Image (cartoon, grey):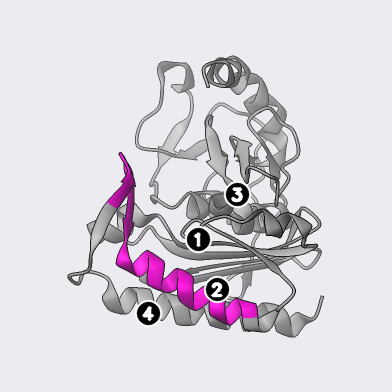
Amino acid sequence: MNKDLLAEVAEIAADAGRFAIKLWNTDFRRWEKAPGNPVCAVDLEVDGMLRYRLGELLPDAGWLSEETIDSAARLDADRIWVVDPIDGTRDYLRGRPGWAVSIALVDKGRPVLGVLDAPAREEVWVAEAGNGAFRNGERLRVAARSELAGARVPADQLSKVDHDLVMVAKPNSIALRIAMVAAGEADLLATIRWGNEWDIAAAVLLAGEAGAAVSDAFGRPLAFNTPDAQAFGVLATAPGIHAAAVERLRERAEAAVGGR
């Protein structure tokens, strides 16, 4: 891939981040798309900005974003932008720093370029398939952990069955939580529910390029630009504990799928 493309996408993400942080903690419109699913006017403005700028960069690429009505036309595109204009909207609305602009370029179902711009944390995360992952220019490497007990998990609380895990600070942005695994600041990130591709596409590439094992909740490979743009869970771990994490989650994941 043209290395200039990653730099251009990072600059577009930085512009979006500057715009979002300028409006952060100001009086803007906010509402719920559905109960428990907040959105705000800044989400929509950033989405429009990104769609225009990224569309100019690669006119042939499809588009999938949390804040844009989906179109089946994207399924015919080899390359597609997968975007969450503000991942971690709850933290954005609460004045907390755990949010980021998330941009991924997916080629034939696989993320090949990813950027997270987290201006409130003064962090820029970038990854390119085959060329590693970086935060603020520093190469990332997943932690070397071989025992599930003691694994660090970004969480607000843990169930009794997970009492042997260790909670660490949890940003609202799932992309940033996955990125924590990439940076070796957490050992395990797991969700056991249906989730959207735009939440994870950029961060999954970051984690994989940093050496993490990444899958859905059952340990299966993740695919992107799928018809429903969803996957059942995401599991990003230090490679030495991935199999044990899959096994621990198995019953809960099967119960959750059965209850959909």
At horizontal 53% and vertical 22% (from top left) the residue drawn is: 260
Mark 2–mark 4 Cα distance, whole angstroms, equals 15 Å
Whole-percent x and y of residue 210? 69, 56
What amino acid is at disc 2? Arg
What amino acid is at disc 1? Thr
Q: Which mark is residue 19?
A: 4
* Pointer 2 or 4: first along the chain: 4
> Considering only vertical position in the picture, is 25 above or below 183?
below
Contact flag, marks 2 and 1 (Cβ < 8 Å): yes
At horizontal 53% and vertical 29% (from top left) the residue drawn is: 192
What amino acid is at disc 3? Glu
In this rendering, which labeled residue sits more in front, label 3 or label 1?
1
Whole-percent x and y of residue 168? 41, 43
At horizontal 47% and vertical 69% (from top left) the residue drawn is: 47
On the image, numbered disc 1 is attached to which residue? Answer: 68
On the image, numbered disc 2 is attached to which residue? Answer: 51
State the SS at label 3.
Answer: helix
Whole-percent x and y of residue 60? 75, 74
* Pointer 2 or 1: first along the chain: 2
Contact flag, marks 4 and 1 (Cβ < 8 Å): no
